[in-house]
Image (spheres, grey):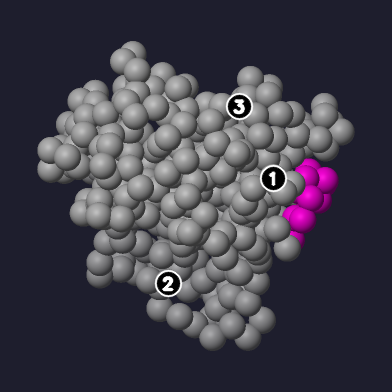
Amino acid sequence: MASFSPPPKYLIDLLLAWYDDQARTLPWRIKGENHHDPYAVWVSEIMLQQTTVATVKDYFIRFMNVFPTVFDLANAPLEDVLVVWQGLGYYSRARNLHKAARKLVQDFQGFFPSETAVLQTLPGIGPYTAAAIAAIAFNTPCLPVDGNIARVFARMRAIETPLPSLLSEVRTEIKAFVGHGRHHGDVAQALMDLGATVCTPTSPSCNICPWNADCQSARNNTTDQYPTPTIKKKKPLKFAHAYLIQTPSGQLWLRKRPDTGLLAGLMEVPMSDWLEDETLLVQTPPIGGAWIKAPSVIKHVFTHFDLYVQLWTITIDESSLPIEGFWACQSTLPQLALPTLIKKVIKNTQPLSDKS
C-alpha cells in the first residue's frame, strides 16, 4: 500500500473542520467526547442497513420510544418488535436485533462489548456495524467501511477494484487514518456524511468537498468512473397466487408465515409457493367457493428477485375454516406484523365496511 500524500492527519483535520460545520443532525448522533449510548448507535446502524437516513429517522424515534433500553427490547415478544418494525422491510434485521438483545442481557448483563471481534458474535452484526459501534460508542481505534466510505476512497485514490472486493481494499487503505483526529467516532461519522451528502454516487459536489484538492479523480475529472461498476446480473422473476378471504363485515383471514425463510414469522393471506417457472404455478385455492380473479397482477420488488402475484378474492360468512389461520378485523391490522407485500395485496382488494 502506497503512503498517503498529503498525510492522513492533514486530511483528517480538513475532514473534521468540514464536519464541525456541515454534520447532519441525527436523532442518534452526539459529536465529540460526549457519551454515546451504544444501544442507540446499534439500533440506528442496523436500521440503516439497506435503508436511507431520511426513512430511518422517524422509525428510530418510534422504536426507541417503545423499546428505550436493551432490556425492554430483550423482554418484548418478537411479534411486538416486528409490528414496530413494519415499513422498514428486511425483517431479518428486526429478528436479529431481538436475538442480539436477549444475548446481551443473558451473556453481558445488558452491557455492550467494545471489541469489534466480540460485537461480531452478536446476531446481525458484521464487520462494518461492529466497527461503527466500537468507534462511535466507545472511541475504539477503528473505522467502518461501507459503500459510501468505499466510494470516497475509490475516488480519492483512483482505485479501480470493483465492489464488493473494493471494500476489502479500502479497509486496508483506511488503516492509515486510524489514530488521527480528536475522536474516532467523529472521524467515522464525518466519513459517513462525506460519502452520503457530498461524494454521492452521481453528480458529486466536488466544489464543496474538503478533500477536493487531494482527490485524484476530482483532479482528473473522472469521478464518474469510480467506483468501477460491477456487471449486474438480471434479477430473476418469481410468481405466486394470493388468496384473500373476507367476510361481509370486512374481516380478513390471515395466517403466520414459517419462522424461517423470507418474511419469517410475519402475517400473510394464504399464498401458493413462489415459483420461478410460471407454467408450473397451479391455481389451488385453500377453500372451495366462488373465487374472483383480480384484473391486474401485483408486482413486489425484493432485493434478489421480483415477485408477481395474482390475487384471488372470495367473500364468505364468518365461520371457522379448515385451514391454518385466524380472522382479523380491519381495525386491528395496524397492530399486526404485516409485510409490505401483504399490505399491497389487501390494498388491491375491494374494501368492505368493518362492522365487527
Helix, strand or loop at label 1? It is loop
Task: Report if residue 162 is visible in the image.
Answer: no
Real-space Cα separation, disc 3 to disc 1, in angstroms: 14 Å
Q: Does residue 283 lie above or below 149 as drawn?
A: below
Among the two numbered marks 3 and 1 on one chain, the one whose residue lies closer to the N terminus: 1
Disc 2 + disc 1, Cβ < 8 Å: no
Q: Residues within 10 Å of mark 3 (few under 14, many from 20)?
A: some
Residue position for label 2? 347
Task: Report if residue 2 is visible in the image.
Answer: yes
Quarter holding residue 154: top left
Disc 3 + disc 2, Cβ < 8 Å: no
Disc 3 + disc 1, Cβ < 8 Å: no
Residue position for label 3? 141
Real-space Cα separation, disc 2 to disc 1, in angstroms: 48 Å
Residue 70 screen position, x and y as percent: 78, 45
Helix, strand or loop at label 2? It is helix
Q: Residue at x 47, y 50 (%)?
A: 17
Residue 190 screen position, x and y as percent: 48, 46
Return the residue nearer the eye: 72 or 255: 72
Among the two numbered marks 3 and 2 on one chain, the one whose residue lies closer to the N terminus: 3
Residue position for label 1? 33
Q: Please, what is the three-letter code of the amino acid marked with disc 1? A: Glu
Q: Residue at x 41, y 19 (%)?
A: 172
Q: Is residue 355 left or right of residue 347?
A: right
Q: Is residue 14 left or right of residue 159?
A: right
Residue 353 screen position, x and y as percent: 54, 86
Return the residue nearer the eye: 104 or 347: 104
Q: Does residue 111 lie above or below 265 as drawn?
A: above
Q: Residue at x 33, y 33 (%)?
A: 153
Q: Please, what is the three-letter code of the amino acid marked with disc 3? A: Pro
The N terminus lies in which quarter of the figure? top left
